[in-house]
Each structure stands twice: as C-alpha cells, then as structure tokens.
Image: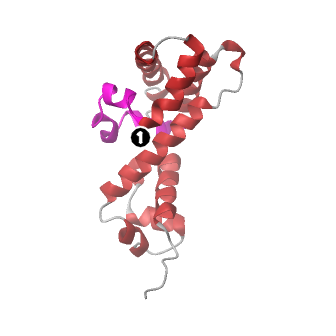
Amino acid sequence: MPPKPKITKDMVVDAAFEVVRETGAEYINARTVAKKLNCSTQPVMYHFATIEELKKAAYAKADVYHSEYLMNIKSPQGGVMLGIGLNYIRFAIEEPHLFRFLFQSNFFTGTTLLEMIDAEELFPVLSAMQGAVGGSIEQVKEIFITIFLEASSVCVKHICLPHGI
C-alpha cells in the first residue's frame, strides 16, 4: 500500500486560495502553490491534472468565503439588507484580488447572473434578506440582483479602476 500523501487536496486548494488573496488569480501556478506549501510541484499536480482545475477549486473556496463574509454583519441596527450591501462593498475594498477573481474573471463570466442567483452558496444570503424584507424568495432575488448590479458598478468605478485592479 502506498504511503498516505502528506499534502492533501484541501491543503493545495487552501494554498491556491491564499495565492489569489495575496497576489491575484493570474499567479496561481504549480510553483507558487508549491512554494506556499513548502513542497515540490509534484503534490500540486498529483491532486490537480491541470491548473485550470485548481483555479476552479480555488474559485469555489473564494465563493464560499465571500458568502460567509457577506453574512458577517457587524452592526445590524441598519438592517440586514444594508449590512449585506455594505459588506459587499467592504469585501471589494479589503479583498480586491478575491473580488476581481470572483466577479471580473473568466470564472465568473462562465456563470450568468441568473445562474448565480440560484447557486447553493448564495442561499444563506437570500434567506437572511428574505427574513429582513418578508417577501417571497423571487422578490428577494430581484432585490439582490438590483443591489448586486448597483454595488458592482460602484466597486468597479470607485474602487477597482482607480487602483488598477
């Protein structure tokens, strides 16, 4: 029986996520991820046949992280809706490489806004919004899309473009 790998698939995904977070998705490659793990490139390529597969796994991790970030509302006295909207903008400021990876990369363009709104990862956000507004899930989805488009426009115009992100 072969020895158990010391570097797990989750460790490789976590390292790729950190590379994106610190420097951007364009820096995900076997060498940068291996350097983050303090190992050779062999474990990285063992778990992922292509770097594209690794980027997709890192994207999924970033998506979950983003949803959790949105739901971490520090001052709910302004309301859940305001808290989620402000967290979305705060995320763009505090995590610019992740924001760009999630919303301005080829990985996002493969998903339509209508597909995104039905994604499992977004369900906690939509549920919280539904609790705040008391409407149907379809009404909440319409509100979310409106907020998403407006906040994205603000982030791109005032945060990403001026900083070359």
Image quarter of the C terminus: top left
Q: Position of residue 9 (x, y in %)?
A: 45, 64
Q: Position of residue 145 (x, y in %)?
A: 40, 18
Q: Amino acid at mark 1?
A: Phe
State the image quarter where residue 107 is shown.
Answer: top left
State the image quarter where residue 87 is shown.
Answer: top right
Main secondary structure along the magenta-highlighted residues: helix
* Residue farthest along the bottom direction in this orientation: 1
Q: Residue 98 lies in magenta, yes or no?
A: yes
Q: Residue at x 59, y 15 (%)?
A: 132
The reply to whether residue 32 is visible in this rendering is yes
Instruction: Work out whether 138 lies above or below 104.
Output: above
Instruction: Work out whether 106 lies above or below 10.
Output: above
User: What is the count of numbered marks?
Assistant: 1
Per the image, the residue denoted by label 1 is 101
Q: Position of residue 80 (x, y in %)?
A: 62, 18
Front one among 21 and 48? 48
Q: Secondary structure at mark 1?
A: helix
Instruction: Work out whether 74 lies above or below 45.
Output: above
Q: Residue at x 50, y 24 (%)?
A: 126
Q: Residue 75 lies in magenta, yes or no?
A: no
Q: Residue at x 54, y 19 (%)?
A: 129
Front one among 42 and 154? 42
State the image quarter where residue 143 is shown.
Answer: top left
Q: Is residue 51 left or right of residue 20?
A: left
Q: Position of residue 65 (x, y in %)?
A: 53, 41
Its colouring scheme is secondary structure
The residue carrying pointer 1 sits among few (fewer than 14), some (14 to 19) or many (20 or more) residues within 10 Å by Cα, namely many
Image quarter of the N terminus: bottom left
The reply to whether residue 97 is visible in this rendering is no
Span highlighted in magenta in the image: 94-119
